[in-house]
């Protein structure tokens, strides 16, 4: 038997005449589990004394087979096949052309139950085989894997190469581009592409999945369908994220890339607009309702500005935070530091222990040409350097307040600006200049917790 379980469990399964795909009943004191036996994902990970069962609900469960457990073979089985090469799909040449770029993540993977591993897609045929509805919405002109990385492993260099690839696809004639992406840092990438792609005339839609395709609660299909509707015929020249708008399979939200944030670890509607309305609601039946009147529509031929200064960091202010956090970065040659301040944008400035004040470190950094940008860890609302004394002092020391910009967006924008040959004063001026919808003109009551 080619199942990567422990020797003891393999012998038990073999004695019961079980092979991958067979229906099995595992009983333990006080519990029983029935489903189809599948291989473990990897030999070196997890508990080899746990058998993996696909329940009828579509979820997988690992059950430890210890001394009190019994394993029985039941009638029925499913066929576990290796990934093959699906036959070419016949596509409608009259539909709008789009390209799909995969960078990894849950949405561009599926379970190969023959080996028990997560297999990554990527070809046009595999995409259409997984979600055949797309063939009735768009013509997938090309589908390719740019790289295959968990989103937390992506770097600014990956943002640069992706922006160049997206621009190339639009110049070739696509109505829009889909970017398949892991969800953990999707909002960073969305912000980066918003700045790095200039004069955008078509929608660039980042889409991911919170639940894998083998789960009954998967969100992959509807997210891809709604994202394709936007990419194919969206009347926007914006980079944005298209994901579930609520937990049910009702509609998706298309959120501006510089105003989107992942707000939950596992909910299907994890991405929300912050200090902004969503650009649009998109229903899987093709309906699109534009919500945000400030959306940009069309421009001239796009071009990439794929630059980024990697000596940029985010530092969170907290009670008792030592100024050595800043000093270490300054001494390491960092050119820009985004401070996640408390409230309106505050840091320790006049504590009882004067050595804990951040002001001397900021002043020293400013003299060395370091740009300090202040956001709020509150996320919602606006920073201000003119209300409280601490903020006034920090501003006088040379820090720039980022209005209603999200900390992650401030990090991306600061790195992008420093990647140009701008002088420090130009960088500071452009930080508070709205370039890609990252700064709102005012805080609206109807943008809170939507």
Image: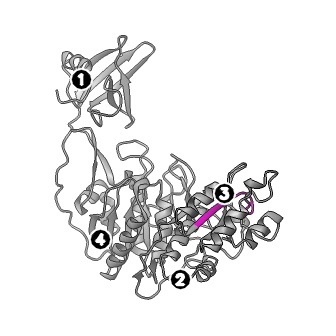
Looking at the rendering, the stretch of residues picked out in magenta corresponds to: 337-346
Single out the mark in the foreground, 1 or 2: 2
Single out the mark in the foreground, 4 or 3: 3
435 or 351: nearer the viewer? 351
Say above or below: 40 vs 445.
Answer: above
What secondary structure is marked by label 4? strand
Give the color scheme: rainbow, by chain, secondary structure or one colour. one colour
- Indicate whether residue 2 is drawn in magenta: no
- Indicate whether residue 345 is drawn in magenta: yes
Residue at 29% over, 23% down:
24
What secondary structure is marked by label 3? loop
Earlier-in-chain disc, 4 versus 3: 4
Residue under label 1, please give it.
75
Q: Quadrant of residue 347?
A: bottom right
Residue at 53% over, 83% down:
422
Q: Quadrant of the N terminus?
A: top left
Residue under label 4, please give it.
139
Earlier-in-chain disc, 2 versus 3: 3
Instruction: Give coordinates of residue 18: x percent, y percent.
Output: 21, 23
Instruction: Give coordinates of residue 313: x percent, y percent.
Output: 55, 62
């Amino acid at each position: 038997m080619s199942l990567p379980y422990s020797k003891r469990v393999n012998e038990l399964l073999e004695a019961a005449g079980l092979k991958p795909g067979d229906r099995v009943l595992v009983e333990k004191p006080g519990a029983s589990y029935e489903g189809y036996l599948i291989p473990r994902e990897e030999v070196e990970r997890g508990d080899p004394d746990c058998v993996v069962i696909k329940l009828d609900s579509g979820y997988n469960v690992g059950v430890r087979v210890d001394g009190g457990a019994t394993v029985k073979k039941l009638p029925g089985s499913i066929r576990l096949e290796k990934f093959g090469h699906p036959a070419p799909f016949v596509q409608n040449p009259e539909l709008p052309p789009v390209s799909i770029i995969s960078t990894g993540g849950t949405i561009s993977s599926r379970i190969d139950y023959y080996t028990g591993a997560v297999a990554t897609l990527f070809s046009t045929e595999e995409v259409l085989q997984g979600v055949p509805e797309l063939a009735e919405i768009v013509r997938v002109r090309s589908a390719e894997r740019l790289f295959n990385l968990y989103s937390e492993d992506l770097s600014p260099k990956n943002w640069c190469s992706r922006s160049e690839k997206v621009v190339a696809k639009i110049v070739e004639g696509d109505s829009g581009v889909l970017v398949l992406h892991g969800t953990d840092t999707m909002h960073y990438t969305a912000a980066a592409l918003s700045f790095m792609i200039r004069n955008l005339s078509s929608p660039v839609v980042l889409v991911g999945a919170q639940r894998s395709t083998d789960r009954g609660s998967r969100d992959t299909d509807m997210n891809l369908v709604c994202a394709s509707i936007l990419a194919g015929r969206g009347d926007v020249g914006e980079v944005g994220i298209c994901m579930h708008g609520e937990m049910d399979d009702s509609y998706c939200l298309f959120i501006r890339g510089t105003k989107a944030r992942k707000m939950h670890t596992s909910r299907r509607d994890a991405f929300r607009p912050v200090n902004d309305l969503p650009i649009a609601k998109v229903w899987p039946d093709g309906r699109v309702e534009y919500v945000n009147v400030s959306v940009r529509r069309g421009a001239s031929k796009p071009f990439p500005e794929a630059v980024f200064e990697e000596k940029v960091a985010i530092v969170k202010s907290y009670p008792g935070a030592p100024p050595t956090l800043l000093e270490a970065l300054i001494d390491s040659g960092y050119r820009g530091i985004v401070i996640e301040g408390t409230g309106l944008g505050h840091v320790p400035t006049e504590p009882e222990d004067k050595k804990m004040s951040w002001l001397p470190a900021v002043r020293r950094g400013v003299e060395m040409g370091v740009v300090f940008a202040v956001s709020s860890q509150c996320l919602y609302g606006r920073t201000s350097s003119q209300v409280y004394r601490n903020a006034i002092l920090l501003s006088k020391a040379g820090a720039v307040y980022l209005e209603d910009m999200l900390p992650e967006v401030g990090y991306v924008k600061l790195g992008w600006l420093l990647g140009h040959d701008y002088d420090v004063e130009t960088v500071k001026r452009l930080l508070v200049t709205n370039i890609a919808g990252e700064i709102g003109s005012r805080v609206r009551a109807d943008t809170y917790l939507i």
